[in-house]
C-alpha cells in the first residue's frame, strides 16, 4: 500500500511544517526503535521468536516497535524532551549477514516500503498521533545513499537486484563499485561505504528516475505521517546538489549526518544552502577535548566552539550531542559523573539543539563502539537516575528562558550567540542571552582552586541565582564572580546563573535562593587573600562552592 504513495505528483508549492526556526527551541531524544521499549499487551511483537534476553553483541532483533515507543512516551516527556528521533522506517534487507541482522534499521533496500519488523502503516500513524497529542514532534531517520548487498557484484546483476527486493533494480541506478578514499571528496560522494562482507552499493542520485522517485516518496512520507523533521544518514556521501530539492520536497527541517571534525567542510552545508543543518560533530570533538578527561584540554574546546560560532551561518540549529549509535557511550570513556554533567551543560546551553541518545540518561557505560553502544534500554527499568534528573533540569531551564522571553542586551536566549567570556585550561564561562554557564573539567574531587569570571555581564552587587541548585549569591562591586572548587562535595560542579529577577520571571527558585553569600566591596586580590585564610573554613562548612568577589 505504502509504495503506491510514491507515484503521487509533487505539489507545486509546499508549506513548511517544522522548519528550522521552529526546531531551534526543541530538545531531541534519539532512540533505536528495536532497542528502546519491549513488546507489551498494547505493543505486540512484530518479530518471532525473540531472544529471551537482548544481548547487543548478538546483533539480532529484540522486539522494539513503533507501538512500544508509545508505551514509554511518559518517560521521554518526563525528561523534558519534546521531539523524538526514531530509526529509519523503511524496509531493510531481511537475511542473515556476516554481521547478523539489520535490527538497527539502516540497511534500507527499499525506501518506499515500511519496515514490517517495526510495525504497520497504522502503527506509525499511531506513534505520530501520540507524539503530537503531547505537543511533541517526530523526527525520522532516512537512508537514501546506499543499498546493502552481500556481494560487490550485485549492482551489475539485474537478477540479483530483483531477488534482494531492492527498489533499484537496474545497474544504471548505482555508481560503479569503488571503496571510498576519504582524502578525495569525489570519492566520498560517489564510492561505496561498507566492506566486502556487507557492501553498501552507492545509489546514483544524479539519475533522473532516482531523483524523481525519491522526491515523490519523501513528500508523501512526511505528509502521510505528519513528520516534523528528517535526520539524513550519510549526508556527505551524496553530491550536495541533490539535497536542496529533496529537502524542499519534504517540506520539513533537514539535519544531516556529516561525520567530520572539519569545521569549514561541515559549515559548507549551511553556507552553500545544501540543507538546514547538520549534527554538530565538530562541537562534539570540542566537548570531548574539554570535558572528556579530568583536567582535559579546555583550550581545545574553546578554540573549536569559537570556530563553530564564526563559520556556521546559523549554529543555533546544529544538533548538539555527546554520544550516539556510532560513537562510544560518554560514560564508557569518562567515568566521572561531574565531567558528564558539565559536558551536558555545554550540550544544552551552547548554541544548538540538544540531542540525547537513549541510555545517556541511564549512564550506560558498556558501549565503546557498535554494536555494544546499542543495548536495549528496558533492563534499566527506566529508572529515575541522577542523570535523568539533570537532563530534566537542563530542559526546564532551557524551556523557561525560551518561553518567558527574558533578554540580555535586548536579545533573547534563542536570538543570542554564545560568547565565551572567560576560560582557563580547566574552566570556561559561556554567556548566552540571560544565562551565564560556568563549567569545568576538574572532576569530582574537591580542589584548592578557583575560577574568576570578571566579564559576567551582571551588574555590580547584583543578586544572581544558580538555576541548577537555587543558591543565591551577590556579585562584587565590578559584577565579577569567582567559583571555588574546594568545598567537600562541590568539586567540579557546573553552574548556570541568571539574575534573581530573571529567575523569578522564569519561575525558578522563587524570589530567594537557598543559600546567600554577600560579597564585600574589596578588590579581587584582597578577596583571594581572604579565601586562602578566613573564608576557606567557612566554605568547607557551607553548602556552597563559590566565592563572589
Image: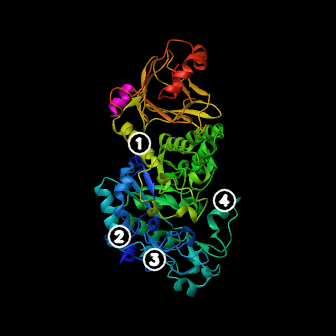
Relative to 386, is 526 on the left or the right?
Answer: right
Q: Mark 4 vs mark 3: give the one in front.
A: 3
Q: Is residue 40 above or below residue 254?
A: below
Q: Which residues are magenta?
A: 500-507
Q: In 3D space, how far apart are the residues under numbered discs 4 and 3 (Cα atoms)? A: 42 Å
* Residue picked out by circle 3: 50
Whether tag 4 and tag 3 are in contact, CB under 8 A, the answer is: no
Q: Position of residue 306 (x, y in %)?
A: 59, 38
Front-lying residue, 407 or 380: 380
Q: Position of residue 34 (x, y in %)?
A: 45, 68
Which image quadrant: the N terminus? bottom left
* Residue picked out by circle 2: 40
Q: Earlier in the sequence, mark 2 or mark 4?
A: 2
Whether tag 2 and tag 4 are in contact, CB under 8 A, the answer is: no
SS for dot 3? loop
Q: Earlier in the sequence, mark 1 or mark 4?
A: 4
Q: Is residue 475 above or below residue 373?
A: above
Amino acid at each position: 500500500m505504502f509504495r503506491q504513495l510514491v507515484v503521487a505528483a509533487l505539489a507545486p508549492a509546499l508549506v513548511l511544517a517544522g522548519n528550522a526556526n521552529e526546531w531551534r527551541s526543541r530538545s531531541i531524544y534519539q532512540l533505536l526503535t528495536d532497542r528502546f521499549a519491549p513488546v507489551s499487551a498494547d505493543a505486540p511483537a512484530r518479530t518471532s521468536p525473540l531472544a529471551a534476553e537482548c544481548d547487543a553483541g548478538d546483533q539480532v532483533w529484540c522486539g522494539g516497535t513503533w507501538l512500544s515507543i508509545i508505551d514509554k512516551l511518559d518517560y521521554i516527556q518526563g525528561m523534558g524532551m519534546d521531539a523524538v528521533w526514531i530509526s529509519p522506517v523503511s524496509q531493510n534487507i531481511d537475511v542473515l549477514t556476516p554481521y547478523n541482522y539489520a535490527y538497527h534499521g539502516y540497511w534500507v533496500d527499499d525506501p518506499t516500503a515500511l519496515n514490517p519488523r517495526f510495525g504497520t502503516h497504522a502503527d506509525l500513524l499511531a506513534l505520530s498521533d501520540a507524539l503530537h497529542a503531547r505537543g511533541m514532534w517526530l523526527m525520522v531517520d532516512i537512508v537514501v545513499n546506499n543499498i546493502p548487498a552481500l556481494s560487490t557484484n550485485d549492482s551489475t546483476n539485474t537478477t540479483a537486484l530483483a531477488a534482494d527486493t531492492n527498489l533499484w533494480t537496474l545497474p544504471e541506478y548505482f555508481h560503479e563499485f569503488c571503496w571510498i578514499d576519504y582524502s578525495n571528496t569525489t570519492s566520498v560522494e560517489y564510492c561505496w561505504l561498507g566492506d566486502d562482507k556487507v557492501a553498501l552499493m552507492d545509489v546514483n542520485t544524479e539519475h533522473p528516475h532516482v531523483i524523481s522517485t525519491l522526491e515523490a516518496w519523501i513528500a508523501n512520507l512526511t505528509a502521510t505521517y505528519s513528520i516534523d523533521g528528517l535526520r539524513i544518514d550519510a549526508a556527505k556521501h551524496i553530491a550536495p546538489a541533490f539535497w536542496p530539492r529533496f529537502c524542499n520536497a519534504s517540506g520539513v527541517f533537514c539535519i544531516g549526518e556529516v561525520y567530520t571534525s572539519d569545521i569549514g567542510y561541515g559549515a559548507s552545508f549551511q553556507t552553500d544552502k545544501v540543507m538546514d543543518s547538520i549534527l554538530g560533530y565538530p562541537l562534539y570533538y570540542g566537548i570531548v577535548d574539554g570535558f572528556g578527561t579530568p583536567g582535559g584540554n579546555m583550550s581545545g574546546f574553546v578554540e573549536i566552539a569559537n570556530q563553530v560560532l564564526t563559520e556556521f551561518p546559523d549554529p543555533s540549529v546544529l544538533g548538539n550531542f555527546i554520544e550516539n549509535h556510532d560513537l562510544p557511550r560518554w560514560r564508557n570513556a569518562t567515568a566521572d559523573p561531574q565531567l558528564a554533567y558539565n559536558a551536558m551543560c555545554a550540550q544544552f546551553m551552547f548554541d544548538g539543539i540538544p540531542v540525547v541518545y537513549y541510555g545517556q540518561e541511564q549512564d550506560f557505560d558498556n558501549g565503546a563502539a557498535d554494536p555494544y553502544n546499542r543495548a536495549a534500554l528496558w533492563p534499566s527499568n527506566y529508572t529515575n537516575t541522577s542523570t535523568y534528573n539533570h537532563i530534566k533540569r537542563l530542559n526546564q531551564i532551557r524551556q523557561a528562558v525560551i518561553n518567558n522571553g527574558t533578554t540580555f542586551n535586548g536579545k533573547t536566549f534563542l536570538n543570542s550567540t554564545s560568547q565565551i567570556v572567560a576560560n582557563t585550561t580547566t574552566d570556561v564561562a559561556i554567556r548566552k542571552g540571560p544565562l551565564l554557564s560556568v563549567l569545568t573539567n576538574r572532576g569530582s574531587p574537591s580542589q584548592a582552586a578557583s575560577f574568576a569570571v570578571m566579564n559576567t555581564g551582571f551588574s555590580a552587587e547584583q543578586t544572581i541565582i544558580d538555576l541548577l541548585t537555587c543558591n543565591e549569591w551577590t556579585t562584587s562591586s565590578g559584577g565579577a564572580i569567582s567559583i571555588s572548587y574546594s568545598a567537600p562535595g562541590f568539586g567540579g560542579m557546573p553552574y548556570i546563573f541568571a539574575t534573581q529577577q530573571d529567575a523569578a520571571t522564569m519561575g525558578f527558585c522563587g524570589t530567594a535562593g537557598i543559600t546567600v553569600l554577600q560579597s564585600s566591596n574589596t578588590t579581587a586580590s584582597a578577596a583571594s587573600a581572604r579565601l586562602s585564610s578566613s573564608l576557606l573554613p567557612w566554605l568547607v562548612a557551607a553548602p556552597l562552592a563559590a566565592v563572589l568577589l
